[in-house]
Amino acid sequence: MAASVFGSLVGLGGGFVVIPLLRVAFGVPPAQAAGTSLLLVFANTAASTVGYMRDRVVDLRLAVPLTISAVPGSIAGVLAVKRFSPTGFDVAYGVVLVVLAVLVLGRRRMTSRPIEERTFAHNPRVALAAGFGVGFFSSLFGIGGGVVLIPLLLILARMPPHVVTATSAFVITTTAPVGIVAHAIGHDVDWIFATPLLLGGIVGGSLGPPIAKRISSPNLITLLATALILAAVGLAARHIL
């Protein structure tokens, strides 16, 4: 539930918190960690998306093409994660988190565009290409597609953080089921962990949107970067210790 509250605040689902926990504390293999985490991410973002849609902060012009191309990307991600060794998975995941955190911290010094302004990300070709990456990384790491959308929309397109968070949650909600089904077919979902994570995700995700409205954009960015770095440190500690 705690991972889901935090995940819904920053548009990354709760996967970036749960994956290090599954890998470090319980030693769950990479493919099972990704598949199991993706269930939490789906429950989390589905619950928070309801609130974001009600508040009308989801950019549907951008979300639709992202969703369309994320479906084949989700299937490709499931196939790719099976080729990772446990160490290779942790290293790749940690590097992605640290790079993302550094980029996000740099975003604090930039001003956001007006909410209604279109950006290069609204170009259908750009959105379709990004959508494939969203689906791929969502299934590969079980983190949801925010790992692609945060740099693209928050850093490059300079969209408002709250709009990025809401749009990211919507796209993950509509595409994660494809990755979940593909992982389940490959027996990559550990239901002993998945069931309580799923229940906590539903509760935590519904609490995120009301909290997000009370947090300023700079503070939201700091929260995101801090969580990403802590998750990377947890994975590194597993191999160092």
Image (cartoon, rainbow, N blue to C red):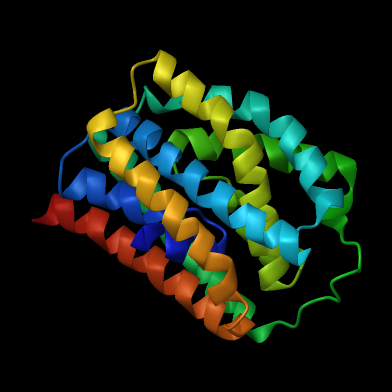
Check the image and name the residue furthest to the top. 185
Image height of 163 relative to 17, above or below? below
The C terminus sits in image quarter:
bottom left
Residue sitting at x 44%, y 66%:
6
Q: Is residue 78 left or right of residue 233?
A: right
Image height of 141 relative to 159, above or below? above
Between 93 and 51, the one lying in front of the other is: 51
Q: Position of residue 67 (x, y in %)?
A: 73, 37
Image height of 171 relative to 98, above or below? above
State whether residue 198 appears in this view: yes
The N terminus sits in image quarter:
bottom left
Q: Position of residue 119 (x, y in %)?
A: 87, 61
State whether residue 155 appears in this view: no
Q: Quadrant of residue 66?
A: top right
Residue sitting at x 46%, y 50%:
202
Q: Position of residue 86 (x, y in %)?
A: 25, 34
